[in-house]
Image (tube, rainbow, N blue to C red):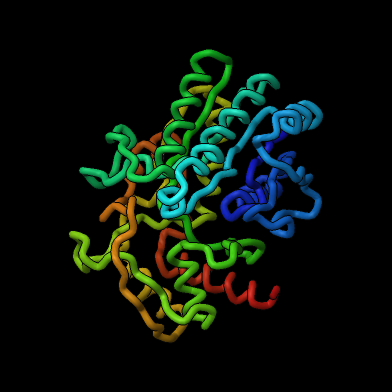
Amino acid sequence: MTVLVTGGCGYIGCHLVWALHDRGAPVVVLDNLSTGFDWAIPKDVMLVRGDIGDGRLLDRTLREQQIDTVIHFAASSVVPESVADPLAFYGNNTGKSRNLLAAAVRAGVKTFLFSSTAAVYGNPKIVPVREDAETSPMSPYGASKLMTEMMLADVSRAHDFHYAALRYFNVAGADPSGRCGQSTAKASHLIKAACETALGLRPEIEVFGSDFETPDGTGVRDYIHVSDLVDAHLLILDQLRAKKANLVLNCGYGRGFSVLEVLAAVERAAGREFPIRYSARRPGDPAIAYASTELLHQVIDWQPKWNDIDAIVGHALAWEKRLLGKS
């Protein structure tokens, strides 16, 4: 059973590819390398360089590589960019996901894992956020992902097709073994940006919003270590193949840290303070968002190894230091 990983050279995708490789599972990566890196995956994993909007390439790859499972990461993901250019996000995230689903149906793919997001909830009225909470995205990014979830549900009703939509909260950290991490230059992720600032690669860290209704005025988020997230993917994949029942699951730890708490953790790890500049809130940013993980733990026997903000930050900082050696 061969797995196709779209966006497998990107941040989360490459960690999953390594995990599948460690399992000895046959895996093929499809990536246009717009934000990913071919060196981020094992050298003996097949990389098909191309776009999920290319129907002919999809048909050929799914057929020739005998793909039975698709794990779909390929997407645009920067919330402010989605507000500035919504049509690009709907085209890349929703339109091209439709093309991928159509190709999967044509090829008889029966198992599909989708990288969704907590942004589908918008500004949640109740935290921790349960999977049955109202979905009211505040950004085109969140809306584009929710639309894909809706397509998955419709496709599963019409075909012999089962899916899991995994609603990530804030993914952070890096492979504890140092094989891969968040490598996109000047990425907007808070922990990456803070680590770069601690290493002198940025002059300061910008905090968007200091007047939220939170204990210290900054946004509160659920940060999940990328390696724990990948472990959850593997368990969910096993469950999906065995039970053939659709799943919509939050992926987080069920507790939140404020922006200032995260920055303090980075300063502890780096052993130095760095400049902080406060700016206005960004469009589409909720005040507080952290997951209810009750359903996730009911479905799989998931035991997170790195449920600690200092461990997450420590691995992220170690990866940034490693990247400095690559440049």
What residue is shown at x 44% (from left), y 46% (from top)?
168
- Above or below: residue 65 compared with residue 276: above
Q: Quadrant of the C terminus?
A: bottom right
| Occupied quadrant, residue 238 | top right
The residue positioned farthest toward the bottom in the image shown:
272
Residue 87, position as x, y percentages in the image: 49, 40
Report whether 253 appears left or right of 112. Answer: left
Report whether 144 appears left or right of 216. Answer: right
What residue is shown at x 39% (from left), y 35% (from top)?
298
Residue 2, position as x, y percentages in the image: 72, 34
| Occupied quadrant, residue 233 | top right
Q: Quadrant of the N terminus?
A: top right
Give the camera-side residue of 229 and 281: 281
Residue 228, position as x, y percentages in the image: 50, 52
Q: Is residue 251 visible?
A: yes
- Above or below: residue 110 compared with residue 15: above
What residue is shown at x 42% (from left), y 70% (from top)?
310
Give the camera-side residue of 96 and 11: 96
What residue is shown at x 54% (from left), y 67% (from top)?
186
| Occupied quadrant, residue 160 | top right
Residue 178, position as x, y percentages in the image: 63, 66
The tally of labels here is 0
Report whether 110 appears left or right of 82. Answer: right
Give the camera-side residue of 136 and 269: 136
Q: Is residue 234 visible?
A: no
